[in-house]
Amino acid sequence: MRSTLDRADLSTRARIRDSALRLFPSEGFAATTIRALATDAGVSPALVVHHFGSKDGLREECDRYVVAKFRETKLAAMEEGNVVNPAFAAAAFQVSQPLMRYFSWALTRGHSAADELFDEMVREGLEITGVAVDRGMLKDSPDIRTRTVVQMAMMLGMIGFHDHIERNTGIDPLTSEGIAHLTPSILEIFSGLFEEESLAALEKTYRDGAAELRPPG
């Protein structure tokens, strides 16, 4: 896999977009000027405006690109049978590290666009989950939407809290080495943290509680 920021053969539009993916999280959206973006991308400010109209237009392009890359990576993993392969996950994170850092910033910036970005990721996640279930790669669920939303939030939580994870473990989850180290723990959690007896008791507690909350009639 090759890096998103390998600029040798990138178009002008792509160079500007990649500069924004890097500068918006590191410098902040308000502090990143059109001129700074242009300088980083090696183009004129007029070209930035020509391609995207404004910084908001460029941010929207970055959001769309991140969602598209998420979809592309997940589908490639399914096609190659590498959904739970730590080596594939590590390589994918190495390629997408700038995107993950952008995503972490986007989800915590307190902007309505963060809501739109998360909702779009959920839509993509639902479609990809449907493909995985059809192929026998994932279990089906009586409430596939809720499961997907919670799973997406948990996954993105790791991205949003990457600084805290690194501070407490010494592992950066936004690097290929980091995801390779964390994969066994992630798989342990998702493959079953509870013993069967405990899990059965938890499920019974949930069913009983849900029955009590259900309106009569």
Image (spheres, grey):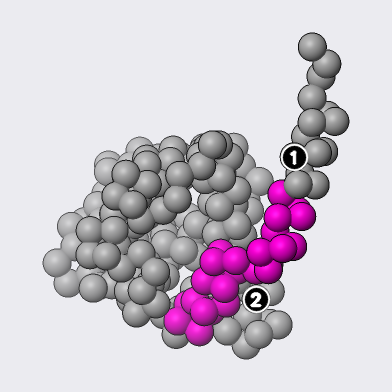
Res 70 → quadrant: bottom left
Is 209 or 27 nearer to us in this picture? Answer: 209
Kind of residue indicated by mark 2: Ile
Disc 2: CA contacts within 10 A as few (<14), some (14-19) or many (>=20): some
Q: Which residue is drawn at 58% across and 40% down?
A: 146
User: Is 206 positioned to the left or the right of 149 in the image?
Assistant: right
Is 71 or 98 nearer to us in this picture? Answer: 71
Label pair 2/1, CB-CB below 8 angstroms: no
Kind of residue indicated by mark 1: Arg
For the magenta stretch, what is the residue range?
Answer: 178-203
Disc 1: CA contacts within 10 A as few (<14), some (14-19) or many (>=20): few
Q: Does the magenta stretch include residue 90?
A: no
Q: Using the image, tell me which numbered label, if any, was put on residue 165.
A: 2
The residue singled out by tag 1 in the image is: 207
Where residue 77 sits: x, y (%)?
A: 29, 62
- Disc nearer the start of the sequence (2/1): 2
Query: Is any atom of residue 94 visible in this view?
Result: no
